Amino acid sequence: MPLLIVLIGVIFLIFLIVKLKLNTYVSLIITSFLIALLLKVPIAKIPTTIEAGIGSQLGHLAIIFGFGSMLGALVSDAGGGYRIATTLIDKFGRRWIQLAIILASFIIGLALFFEVGLVVVLPIVFIIARELDMPLIYLGIPMAATLNVTHAFLPPHPAPTAIANMLHANLGHVLLLGIIAAIPTIIIAGPVFNWVLHKVYPQVYRKNIDISVLGEYKEFKLEETPGFGISVLTAMMPVILIAIGTICSFIIPKTNLVGEFIQFVCAPDEAMLISLIFAIFTMGLHRNKKMAEIENSLTASIKQIAPMLLIIGGGGAFKQVLVAGGISKYVSDLFLHTHMSPILAAWLITAVLRVCLGSSTVSALTAAGLIAPMSQQYGSQSAMAALMVLAIGAGSVFCDHVNDAGFWMIKSYFGLSLKETLLSWSTLTSVLALAGLGSVYLISLFV
C-alpha cells in the first residue's frame, strides 16, 4: 500500500507537469498535499510539514545557489568563458580538439548550470566547427556530456548540493569523489560514444547547421576579455577553496587555530561568498566596470534561478511529506531487506523517476527523500554517503527525452529531427548515467 501511494503521487505529478503543463513548483506542492492526505498525515500538520520541507531545503541552499549563479554571470558577462574556451582550443589543436572542448566545458560548467553553459559554450563551438570544417555535433557531444556531468555530480550545482544536504554527506567528499567519477564518465559518454555514434548513425553528423535558434548572443574580441589564468581561477575558486578545506581536515586537527580558520574560510557558504567577492573584483572592478553594471549582472542571474529555487523548495516539501508519512523509512527498509547495494538502489530509484518526470533536479530530490534513511547509517563523514549522492546524480540524467527542456534545446541547437534526437541524445544520456554508475561503483571498491 505505501508503494502504491507513492506510485499514485508520481503519476499525478507527471499528469500535472506533462499533460496539464502546470508549473512544476505548483505541481509539487499540490502533489505533496495529496500524498499527505493519502498517507493519513494529520490535516493540521500538513501545512507545517510542507513549510518545514521548503524551509529546511532552501535554508542552506539559497546562499550557495544564489552566489554560484552570480559568480557564473560575472564570468560569462566579462568574457571569461569565451577566453577559457578559445585559449584551450588554440593550445590543443585539431587532433585533440575534443579534449580541449571537454576541458573548456568542465571549467565553465563548474560555474554555470547546464542550460546556461550550453548557451555560453555553443556559439564558440559552432565557430570552431565551422573553421575546422567539422560537424557541429562532433564537438557538441563531448561539450554537452561534460556540462551534464558537472551539473549532476559537482557542487555548487543545485542538485548535488541539495542531495548532499538531504543525505547529510560531506560536501567536500562529494566534490572530490565527484571529480574522480566525472573523468571516466565524461570519456565514455564523450569521445567514446562520439566514435560509436559516428559509426552506427552517421547521418546526424552534418556540417550545414543553422545556429540562429540561439538568438542574439554577446560577441567578444579576445583582447578585450580577461586573461586565461584569472578567468580559470575565478571560475574554479569555490571548488579550490572547498577542496582545500576537505584536504586540510585530514591533515590539520580541527582544534588547531589554523585548522579552525581554514575550515571556516573553506566551508561551502563562506567559500562561495569569498569567490563572489573575488569575481566582483577580477571580472568587474578590475576591468573598469561600474558597480551599477555589476549589479545588473547579479540581479539578472538571480531572476534566472528563481524558478529553480522554487522547484528545489517544492522537492523539499515532497520529501518532507514522504518522511512524515513513513514512506521514506518503508522504502529504505524494503531495499535493505532485498540486500540491494545502496548505490544501485539510489541510482535505480532516481533513473525511474527521471524517465517519468523529465526534470533531473526534481527526480534527484524526490529520490533523495526516499532513500535518506539508508544513508543515515553511514554518517556524514562516510565516503558511502557521498557516493550515494553521486549515484543519485548519475541516475538523474538517465534517458533525457521529450518531457525535459534540455532535450528540446539539444534538438534545436544541433538541427536534429525528433527521431535523431531520441537516437542520439537520449542514448547519450543513458550511456552517461550508466557510465556514472559504473564509475561510482569502481570508486566504492577503494574507499
Image: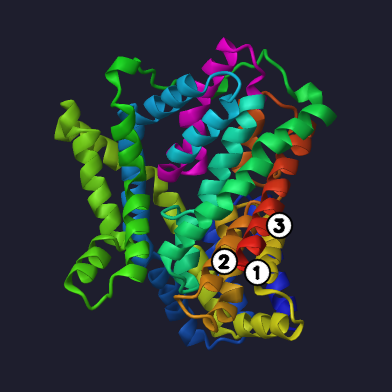
Front one among 404 and 194: 194
Of tags 3 and 2, the one toward the viewer is 2
- Which quarter of the rendering shows the C terminus? bottom right
Q: Nearer the viewer, residue 152 or 184?
A: 184
Q: Which residue is mark 3?
A: 356
Q: Position of residue 429 (x, y in %)?
A: 68, 45
Q: CA distance from mark 2 to mark 1?
A: 7 Å
Instruction: Name the N-terminal-most of marks 3 and 2.
Output: 3
Query: At 39% across and 65% down in the image, what residue appears?
Result: 58
Residue shown at 67% from the left, 58% from the top = 437
SS assignment at label 1: helix
Which numbered circle lies on residue 387? 2
Q: Amino acid at mark 3?
A: Cys
Instruction: Name the quadrant containing residue 417.
Output: top right
Q: Are marks 3 and 1 in contact (CB under 8 Å)?
A: no
Mark nearer the N terminus (3 vs 1): 1
* Mark 1 lies on residue: 343
Quarter of the image for the N terminus: give it: bottom right
Residue 30 point in image, percent of width and height: 56, 67
Report the magenta residues as a range. Answer: 108-137
* 412 vs 245: above or below: above
Residue 285 locus on image (x, y percent)? 16, 33
Marks 2,1: beta carbons within 8 A: yes
Q: Is residue 120 magenta?
A: yes
Predominant SS along the magenta part: helix
The residue depicted at 27 percent of the width and 75 percent of the height is 254
